[in-house]
Image (tube, rainbow, N blue to C red):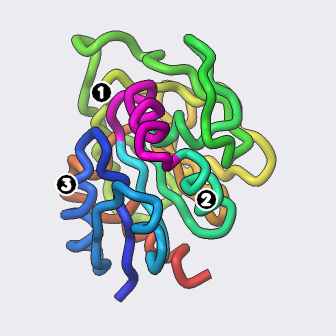
Amino acid sequence: MPVVGVLALQGDFEAHAGALQRAGARAVEVRKAEELEGIDGLVIPGGESTSMLKLMDYYNLFEPLREFGLKKPVFGTCAGAILMAAEVLNPSQRSLDLLDLTVERNAYGRQLDSRVTELTGHALGGGPALEAVFIRAPIIRRVGDGGQVLASYQGDPVLVDFGQHLVATFHPELSADLRIHQRFLEKLGN
């Protein structure tokens, strides 16, 4: 059984842990650099990316997380996708710079503009539409080399596979559909 860490500084890390366990992994919370040892992959959940950056600095996690992501699979959702991108807009902020990706923060609007929708035409097999929960979601403005768009919403990529890594601008952990978490778990054997 793969062991997947969930960055547990802020955001709905418990929902990710539950989804990972239902998908067949053992989930462990990560708050310290030494807790990255012995895990097969990592989920960086949604939340507020600037708050997460401050907490990463406070717990001396920024560099260890970056080093982990250079070696092992990472799945970032919403704020996690922002933190993994090479370029962050609105406003510009530093990131782990793990992916050739440009992300614009809060691009769909304020909290009141959050929504649940269905994504059809996705590349996760012939199953039903994916339920996508967007909460103050970022928009992926550019997908660089190595990125494969798996799902789009209103013409913008919202689920992108980068071989070793996976990012979503929505919250798959808030859906009963486990296909995205299962896709991430498939990366752990690579």
Q: Describe residue 114's horizontal placement relative to residue 71 as left or right.
A: left
Q: Residue 106: image x %, image y %? A: 43, 17
Q: Which residue is mark 1?
A: 135
**Is residue 162 covered in magenta?**
no
Secondary structure state at the residue bearing disc 1: loop
- Badge 1 or badge 2: first in the primary sequence: 2
Q: Residue at x 62, y 42 (%)?
A: 96
Kind of residue at badge 3 = Glu
Circle 3 residues within 10 Å: few <14, some 14–19, many ≥20: some
- Residue 66 x %, y %: 62, 52
Q: Secondary structure at mark 3?
A: helix
Q: Give the residue at x 37% y 78%.
A: 3
User: Residue 123's mark?
Assistant: none
- 130 vs 181, nearest the viewer: 181
N-terminal-most mark, 2 or 3: 3
Which residue is painted at 58% across and 43% down in the image?
84
Q: Is residue 113 left or right of residue 160?
A: left
Horizontal side of 80 relative to 71 (left or right) equals: left
Find the distance from the CA under tag 2 to the CA under tag 3: 21 Å
Q: Quadrant of residue 92?
A: top right
Q: Which residues are magenta?
A: 46-61
Callout 2 secondary element: helix
The quadrant the N terminus occupies is bottom left
Q: Which residue is more in the foreground, 148 or 136? A: 136
Give the residue number, with chain letter if any, for mark 2. Answer: 69
